[in-house]
Amino acid sequence: MRFLERERAALTKLLPGLDDGLRAVPLMTLEGPKSPGIRLFRESGGPGLLAPASLQGRGATALEALRVQRALGSRSPSLAVATTMHHFSMATLVGLSDSGEGLEWMLVQGVASDNRLLASGFAEGRSGSGILSPSMSATVTAEGVRISGVKRPCSLARSMDLLTASVMVPCEDGEGHELAVALVPADSAGLSVSGFWSSTFLAGAESDQVTLDDVLVPPELLVRTASPAGARLDEVQTVGLVWFELLMTGSYLGAASALVERVLLNDRVPEAERVRLLVEIEGAAGAVEGLARRLDESAPDESALADSLYARYSVQDALARIVPRAVELLGGLNFMTSDEVGYLAACSNGLSLHPPARVRMSAALAAYVADGPLTVA
């Protein structure tokens, strides 16, 4: 079986036409601020990848979704990273629709059937905050909830149909507060998008600034999680985080795989070196596929979240070895005559920049293996 054959087959099966469409566009065009990648993703039905078939989605398994993200990362790292943020929000909504008794399923079906894109306004990317910490302030009124705040960077900022944001709201019984997920239409009065991402790397992800100034969210677009402030991770949050780690890891594996693929196709590189690189990256991919298979067998729990972090940090270390070696084997001529090698090498290092950072999770993981609860910094 050829390198990346399974991944690209999964992409073709679930999102027909997308791989061909991406392959027809030069890499550096796909990675630019005017990339057609997000449009191609939407046209292929990508927004419904994780939605069940019963809700007009593609019904992808965790293993299939992982392979799709790796295939996307090998074609366009920007698109893979941006769409992971959509899938993170979607997985959270699917989890709420599975566990709740409200109309969450209608939101999932609406996103899937209309190919709507969800941008994530969670605290991901905000220094000093946990990934699920509310990044917006909310005031409850008779009309709904009014939300103010800033999210930067926010992937899919210019193509989103809805922004998902975590907020704390009073419990319906009037005692205490609970975490809720607000879905904010992109055309809402008071929502604006402005420039933020000045780097040329991953510019195709549309990671700009989204500002909410007293934006009204009606009650039907507010999904309560029943998770009180300061509580341990509940079931729905755990689901979202495990999917985030799984698919983001797969996305960066894809970017590194694009470099490895170039090495494997280069007959001037000794066979022993090509096989050594192949073994290492497929070993890293195997660890993440093991996690995906576990998710397909049973619902994510606290131990699955811990395993997702172990796999993610392990892949980070593997990429730190694989990427420089691939660049070295490709040689100076490839590096000097094209931006692609240097670009892919830089992008592949981005996994370590996503929360939760290993240094911040060290104490939490040490406490967890000593039989304490798992907390996410």
Image (cartoon, grey):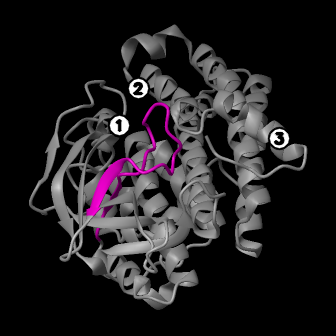
Q: Give yes or no for contact between labels 2 and 1 (Cβ–Cβ under 8 Å).
A: yes
**Residue tagged 2:** 340
Residue 95 image-quadrant placement = bottom right
Where does the image place residue 111, in percent across and percent down from the top left? Answer: 33, 75
Residue 228 image-quadrant placement = bottom right
Name the foreground residue: 151 vs 178. Answer: 178
Measuring 47% from the left and 77% from the top, which residue is drawn there?
51
Identify the secondary structure beneath mark 3: helix
Q: Earlier in the sequence, mark 2 or mark 3?
A: 2
Q: Which mark is residue 367?
A: 3
Measuring 56% from the left and 83% from the top, which residue is drawn there?
98
Residue 7 image-quadrant placement = bottom right
Separation of marks 1 and 3 at Cα, in angstroms = 43 Å
Three-letter code for the amino acid on which mark 2 is drawn: Glu
**Residue tagged 1:** 27
Please tell me whether residue 314 is drawn above or below residue 21 in the rendered image: above
Span shown in magenta: 116-139
Where does the image place residue 81, in percent across and percent down from the top left? Answer: 44, 45
* Image position of 341 (left or right of 218): right
Separation of marks 2 and 1 at Cα, in angstroms = 7 Å
Q: Earlier in the sequence, mark 1 or mark 3?
A: 1
Where does the image place residue 275, in percent across and percent down from the top left? Answer: 77, 32
